[in-house]
Amino acid sequence: MKLTLIGNGTMAQALAKGLVKNHEVEIIGRNLKKLEAVQKEIPQITIKELDDMEDISGKNILFCVKPYVLQTVAARLSGKANILFSILAGTTIDSLKKHIQSRLYVRTMPNVAASVLNSTTTLTGDEEIKKEAVEIFSSIGRAIWVENEKQLDIATAVAGSGPAFLTLIAESIADGAVRAGLPRDLSSQLVHGLFSSTASLLEVQHPALIKDSIMSPGGTTAAGYGVLEKNGVRNAMMDSIQTAYDKATELSKK
């Protein structure tokens, strides 16, 4: 399938790097110099500067701009797309329909791991295109179709924003090891392995069971875990998901 990405930001580039493995990818953007820089990094793509009035008739569009420029960019699009895939956080399908004509609509929330073919992507929209949509986004990792837009907005807080939350934890653990006396390069290697191995365990076991299997009475894990609970790490993570979801809901009302 040929996919036309509108936008050339970080997420569009991450998606393009993954999608070119199995699809023909075109990127349309407002800045030709930036597009040319992207093409140097991803030579398989084709690029095009956004026209004053860009005809999207019959195209499969992956809309990758920031939510606040939806109206500005949509005003420069003419015709009726075949499928509109939107990665705009908090932007409802009803809102998309008011600005961009398409035969079918799908909201999707990938994450930056698309660039290494390991995104966890949630999707929802017209059931008619469900199978094809899941297949497309499975080419950049795991694709999960959810029942409605509320679920997608919650999933956005987890799979979309979550990598930023986890990288804060990863950086903090590495910094803690350095503070205790471990060289930075070794700390980084250990953190990389920690996240990779823990992800493998989470595939087959509940988080609480993993924790219980590690935490022996009076041991090092129990001591460190107590500090995390004392400082409210669990509640802070829960609040971060709720706040990110609330922000997505707020965006949907604008």
Image (tube, helix red, strand yellow):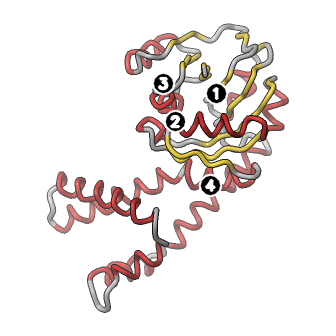
Q: Which dot, 1 or 2, sits closer to the camera?
A: 2
Q: Mark 4 highlights which residue?
A: 244
Measure how far apart labels 4 and 2 are at the Cα level.
27 Å
Numbered tag placed on residue 20 in the rendering:
3
Q: Amino acid at mark 1?
A: Leu
- Along the polypeptide, which appears first: circle 1 or circle 4? 1
* 91 and 201: which is toward the camera: 201
Mark seen at residue 139: 2
Q: Decide which of tag 4 and tag 3 comes sooner along the chain.
A: 3
Marks 1 and 2, the one that precedes in the sequence? 1
Labels 1 & 3 near each other (Cβ < 8 A) = no
Considering the numbered disc 2 on the image, is that residue within a helix, a strand or a loop? loop
Instruction: Give neighbour class at mark 3: few <14, some 14-19, many 20+ (Cα, 10 Å).
Output: some
Query: Residue 246: which quarter of the image?
Result: bottom right
Q: Nearer the viewer, mark 4 or mark 3?
A: 3
Task: Find the distance from the CA under tag 1 to the CA under tag 4.
Answer: 23 Å
> Residue at label 1?
62
Task: Name the mark nearer the viewer: 1 or 3.
Answer: 3
Residue at (17, 56) in percent of width and height: 186
Q: In terms of secondary structure, where does tag 4 sit?
A: helix
Residue farthest bottom in this picture: 217
Question: Which amino acid is tagged 2?
Answer: Ser
Q: Residues within 10 Å of mark 1 (few under 14, many from 20)?
A: many
Mark 4 to mark 3: distance in Å?
30 Å
- Contact, mark 4 vs mark 3 (Cβ under 8 Å): no
Q: Toward the viewer: 1 or 58?
A: 1
Between 55 and 30, the one lying in front of the other is 55
Q: Amino acid at mark 3?
A: Val
The mark lying in front, picked from 1 and 4, is 1
